[in-house]
Amino acid sequence: MKTLSPRRALYEPLAEINVTPLVDVMLVLLIVFMVTAPMLASGMKVDLPQAQSIAPLDPKEPVVITVQKDGRLFLGHNEIASADLVAKLRASHGTDSPPVIHLRGDREVAYGEMVALMDRLAAAGFAKVALLANAQGARNPAH
């Protein structure tokens, strides 16, 4: 076996990677991003001009459909036959801009009935349907 001289051992390549500088750079970048991210989310400050003839946008009220536990349907506060629901919605709102529909169902209504109603509404072109629920511990509001 050949023994290496001490002089040659000094110039041999080192096969280990020093990760300390890498970790230092990554921590600095993390701090920079943590400081700048909230500034980017807030947007630019702009002094908007004032106008006299501006009218606020008229937000569309959602259409509320209620299904009671005995299967009766209500469109708003008016009872309606299940077969007439789509025709009444089309007559009152048209099909060019379908309304947002809030679907309220009693907790004892079968899940299949609610899905079937949502399917009928979607097939008729009313795709913006939301199921409503009460928060835990909240009372049922009178309709």
Image (spheres, helix red, strand yellow):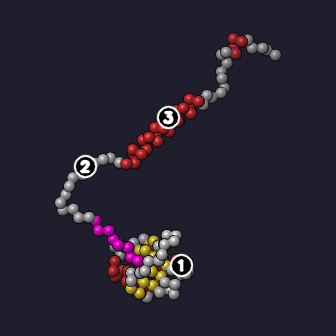
Q: Earlier in the sequence, mark 2 or mark 3?
A: 3
Category of crowding for the residue at label 1, using alpha-carbon neighbours closer than 10 angstroms: few (below 14), some (14–19), many (at least 20)? few
- Which quadrant, please, contains the C terminus? bottom left
Q: Amino acid at mark 2?
A: Asp
Q: Position of residue 83 (x, y in %)?
A: 44, 87
Residue name at image x 39 percent, y 83 percent:
77
- Marks 1/3: CA distance? 54 Å
Range shown magenta: 57-64
Residue name at image x 43 percent, y 74 percent:
102
Q: Decide: is 52 above or below 133.
A: above
Q: Which residue is denoted by mark 1 in the rendering?
A: 107
- Marks 2/3: CA distance? 35 Å
- Marks 2/1: CA distance? 50 Å
Q: Which residue is denoted by mark 3 in the rendering?
A: 28
Please tell me whether residue 13 belongs to the stretch shown in magenta. Answer: no
Residue name at image x 23 percent, y 64 percent:
55
Q: Which residue is denoted by mark 2 in the rendering?
A: 47
Q: Secondary structure at mark 3?
A: helix
